[in-house]
Image: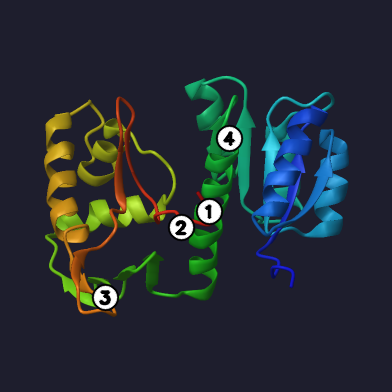
Amino acid sequence: MSKPIEATIVVVDDEPSIRDLLVASLHFAGFEVETAASGSEAIEVIEKTQPDLIVLDVMLPDIDGFTVTRRIRQEGIDAPVLFLTARDDTQDKVMGLTVGGDDYVTKPFSLEEVVARIRAILRRTREQVEDDPIIKVGDLEINEDSHDVSRAGQAIDLSPTEYKLLRYLMDNEGRVLSKAQILDHVWQYDWGGDAAIVESYISYLRKKVDGIEVEDGSGQVHKVDALIQTKRGIGYMIREPKTNAES
């Protein structure tokens, strides 16, 4: 029995090897995929397909990805855009967000990261459309209306700052967030701030979110799997643990 299609995605990249890898990975993840190799072809495919999301290379042989995004936005197409960029350039990233992009991945990238970011973007945009107050990562839930938090059916009491940090992590499920990004979003420190405060609050969250104990079918009590992960030297992320079938 085939998987249900999770979403339709247009992949735009002029390098056949990258296109093929992305198509294979996205098909395996349950997405329907259309492709384009240039900016002008991308506009035609996007207008015809009306996709749920666009994976768009910035550097294309005719018109760049920023121009493609401007044009489809002018046509009223509001599908989210995940940019692929070969340069880790702040100016490129700012430009991408300014023209209507939603996120970016720097080449070389891992296919797992691309799929995780796609799902995070789709979840955010669908929540906005459906106005669903419930955000989930595995058995962890946040109700945005009531600010209630629970894991495995057990209520979790969080301070306002802990809640804001957890909400930011869940909004970016599968994406590593640096301490600087977290400081900027949670504490609005645009001057660097003290990274130790991030470490402290991550520790608080781990105790409350990953310290929950549950009883299994045999009556044994054990801790839930850890959702909050540290990527040494990079930052923190939240991700649903892989099952044995996925590993």
Q: Position of residue 186 (x, y in %)?
A: 24, 46
Q: Residue at x 69, y 70 (%)?
A: 4
The correct choice, above or below, for 21 with respect to 26 in the image is above
Q: Label 4, on which residue? A: 96
Q: Which residue lies under the disc numbered 1?
A: 246
Identify which amino acid the numbered label 2 is placed on.
Answer: Thr
Where disc 4 sits, the SS reads: helix
Q: Quadrant of residue 32?
A: bottom right
| Quadrant containing the N terminus in the rendered view | bottom right
Frontmost residue, 165 versus 115 = 115
Residue 14 in sight in this render:
no
Question: Residue, x 74% and y 69% (percent of image)?
Answer: 2
Query: How far apart, in angstroms, are the residues tagged by discs 1 and 2?
Result: 5 Å
Q: Which comes sooner in the sequence, label 1 or label 3?
A: 3
Query: Residue sitting at 35 percent across and 38 percent down?
Result: 177
Q: Quadrant of residue 13?
A: top right
Query: Which circle's residue, 4 or 2, is located before the other in the chain?
Result: 4
Q: CA distance from mark 1 to mark 3?
A: 22 Å
Q: Are marks 1 and 2 in contact (CB under 8 Å)?
A: yes
Residue located beneath label 3 in the image: 216
Q: Amino acid at mark 1?
A: Glu
Q: In screen coordinates, is 148 left or right of 65?
A: left
The disc placed on residue 243 is: 2
**Is residue 16 shown above or below 154?**
above
Crowdedness near tag 2: few (<14), some (14–19) or many (≥20) residues, C-alpha within 10 Å: few
Pointers 3 and 4 in contact (CB under 8 A)? no
Residues at discs 1 and 4 in contact (Cβ within 8 Å) = no
Return the x and y of residue 114 as percentages of the image width and height: 58, 42
Q: Determine crowd level at label 4: few under 14, some 14-19, many 20+ residues with C-alpha closer than 10 A.
A: many
- Mark 1 or mark 4: name the one nearer the start of the chain: 4
